[in-house]
Amino acid sequence: MYDPERTVEFEFVRATENAALNAMRFIGKGDKNTADAAACDAIQGVFDLVDIRGEVVIGEGIKDQAPGIFLGDRLGKWGPNSPRFNIALDPVDGTTNLSKGSPNAISVMAAAELPHDAKHPVMRNIPSYYSHKIAYGPEVARVLQKEDPEANFLDSPLKETLQRLAKILHKRVGDMVVLVLDRPRNQTFIDAIRQSGASLRTIADGDITAAVAPSLPDSGIDLYVGIGGSPEGVLTATALRALGGEIQLRMWFPNPEAKAREVSGVPEGEIQRIYRSNTIVTGDSAIFCATGIIESPLLPGVKLIGHKAITHSILMRARSRTVRYIRAVHDLEHKTIHLRSTRREKSV
Ligand code: VTB
């Protein structure tokens, strides 16, 4: 049966590759907004030539006032019969890292195809800026799915969660490796991890990569935990649908004013709800794609060798569960990318 997802998915790789190539000139230049704008311009430019109807349900920018692609924006040519996709993206996850030239920056997009008669999005927009998240890999997800599908790790003491996960993974708690976004608001998690005897790793930014890491076979990370961005949580959930891992996520607010501002009119039940990957991305379609800009646990960064640029991307689909690692060699004497801003091809 013809499945548009199978061909369209490769356009997502082109988009994140071009975003990485267009943003790489800004690595270390101390200007995160220009880097982000360059990545957005490249993504929009790719989709201006692709026959889909893409609706952005998770854009960027609100919390960080970034330039870019926002909720409600359209990507694609929007022909009347072209397939419809909900799209979530972070043209650069780790803009601060990119601007400083430090590790951990990727360009990332996720999409879910809408059935023809769909009245509602198939990808959930989590309206809070921040969420409390915990993410683990397929081995743990499989066991819990069988034994305790409602397991709630957001309200149970982290120490107990670590003991339970260690048992499932046939490890000692002391050999468990837990990744946390380094922020003062995550100090209680950091303390609990230290007390449990597990090994702690912290990252400065970029918690999509961090939360996907436990689902990758050789990452050496068993668990991601902490309070990070909500849009990043949705992108993580899409990847985990394809990798078989799991995320538990609940909206989080630093204070009542933030809550009033971010979720006024949202029912309390919805605010308190624990989301999992299949309640964030609800259909059977999920595509996740990322290209490394600067090296991270997920991907190597862009490498410049002579007049060639080498990019590394990961592309996966929930329907087939195929995970592709795509290494591309771009000849910079020939390579051009199509930008939205000029509607032209530009050399890299
Ligand atoms: C994380 C991280 C992002 O936001 O989600 C983080 O993955 C959380 O917010 O790269 P604060 O930076 O405000 O703490 C980013 O750092 C940027 O959106």
Image: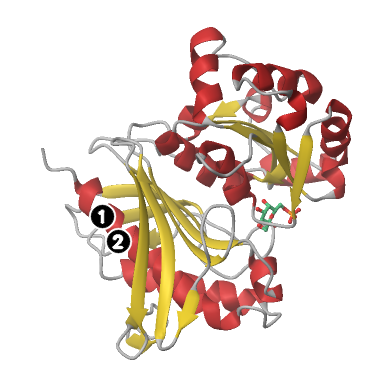
Per the rendering, the mark at residue 183 is none
Q: Nearer the viewer, residue 49 or 203?
A: 203
The residue at the point 62 percent across, 47 percent down is 210
Q: Which residue is most to the bottom?
A: 333
Q: Which residue is mark 2?
A: 11
Locate residue 295 relative to residue 323 in the image: left or right.
right
Q: Quadrant of residue 255?
A: top right
Relative to 162, does residue 15 appear above or below in the rendering? Answer: below
Residue 123: image quadrant is top left
The image quadrant where one finds ligand 1 is bottom right
Whether residue 125 is visible here, answered yes or no, is no
On screen, residue 296 above or below 308: above
Which residue is labeled 1 in the image?
8
- Left or right, 98 with respect to 10, comes to right
Pointer 1 with pointer 2, Cβ within 8 A:
yes
Q: Position of residue 35 (x, y in %)?
A: 58, 76
Image position, residue 306 (x, y; %): 43, 88
Label 1's element?
helix
Q: Amino acid at mark 2?
A: Glu
Q: Residues within 10 Å of mark 1 (few under 14, many from 20)?
A: some
Secondary element at tag 2: helix
Residue 33: percent from left, percent from top: 63, 75
* One can see residue 303 in this view: yes
